[in-house]
Image: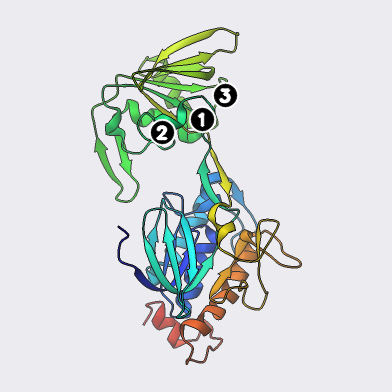
Amino acid sequence: MSALPIHADAVIVGAGPVGLFQAFQLGLQDIRCHIIDALPHAGGQCMELYPDKPIYDIPGIPLCTGRELVAQLQTQIKPFAPTFHLNQEVTEVTRLDNGLLAVHTSADQHFVCKVLVIAAGVGAFQARKLAVDGAPALEGTQVHYRLGDTSRFTGQDVVVLGGEESAVVAALQLIHASQVNVSTQSLTTFQAPRSVTLMHRRDVFTADPVLLQAMRDAVADESMQLQIGQPTGLLVTDGRLHALQIATPDGSTVERPAQQLVALLGLSPKLGPIANWGLAMERKQLVVNTETFATDVPGIFAVGDINTYPGKKKLILCGFHEATLAAFGAAAIVHPTRKTLLQYTTTSTELHRLLGLV
């Protein structure tokens, strides 16, 4: 049974930089919002694709990383206290007879809002799946695409598959029998797996040098195993995974015990359900007008890489501009009897009040 609907002035789909800045601009219009994202954390493409790479074209910030930009944006929106709903996709959007919008998510949450702002970037990021026969049947029980609760691996043979930093970190967390809870920053301890194997198609890993050294040290002291090769088969008995079949670079085939497989093969963006919401689209992007960045459905706006219009440039700073004008458009709907004035944060006592400065 679906939960009772959450009533909100605004819902933002996407917690990337543009979605976060959208929450700030809505806050300046005295509009509180909820933010939904398919990832388990805020940051979107910045955090998934280039968290530690330099960004040089954010106005007033000569240099920052994706991680630093997201942290600053999260600090900026604190006065408006948006509510985050992470690790879930918006699956359905419908316009109700009374003009409000009904928004449903994959986590069975239901929102009723006055405006919806789609800041979904290039789409929802989804884990790249393991292309081995039998993997879908074991997904969620013995094949996983996020590390999740590490206590479920106690006393078992675990293979972590991947060559990026996420795979190296996951393997290190498992051998250290500890895990940091991202939301509370608390450390949880658990009984370690029987064995932990880090597996990649070649002996080249992309991660922070400190992490790479820790991984190499763990392999040297045999607290972690390193397997170079690619999985070619899942060995299953009575519906339970017990080993992996692996093709090695020298052309041989080996078997490695495994009751749990964590496949961290990267993420890929998928447009997903947005294509079915009845909005005008061109080349998988939402068509908007450039006055308010509204779509063809009243109350629904689109900002950032998800939209298209003549002269569109897919830059973060352009998305910030779009979010500003979308907030003014949203204010006309959320506060229909209130005159929407252009105010400046340097001088406006009303904006200072909203920012919690007075």
Quarter of image, res 179: top left
Q: Quadrant of the C terminus?
A: bottom left
- Residue tagged by mark 3? 204
Residue 201, position in %: x, y? 56, 21
* Residue 303 falls in image quadrant: bottom right
Tell me the distance, in whole angstroms, between the alpha carbons under discs 2 and 1: 10 Å
Residue 21: give x, y in percent of width and height: 52, 66
Q: Are marks 2 and 3 in contact (CB under 8 Å)?
A: no
Disc 2 marks a residue whose amino acid type is Glu
In the depicted view, which residue is nearer to us: 193 or 253? 253
**Residue under the image location 61 percent in, 62 percent down:** 304
Q: Which label number is shown at residue 139?
A: 2
Q: Amino acid at mark 1?
A: Leu
Check the image and report above or below for 8 versus 199: below
Q: Closer to the N terminus: mark 2 or mark 1?
A: 1
Mark closest to the chain's N terminus, 2 or 3: 2
Residue highlighted by disc 1: 130
Please indicate whether residue 66 sits to the left or right of residue 145 in the image: right
For the N terminus, the image quarter is bottom left
Total labels: the figure holds 3
For marks 2 and 3, give the one nearer the viewer. Answer: 2
- The residue sitting at 34% across, 28% down in the picture is 174
For the residues marked 2 and 3, what is the alpha-carbon distance in whole angstroms?
27 Å
Where does residue 241 sit, x and y in percent of width and height? Answer: 37, 21
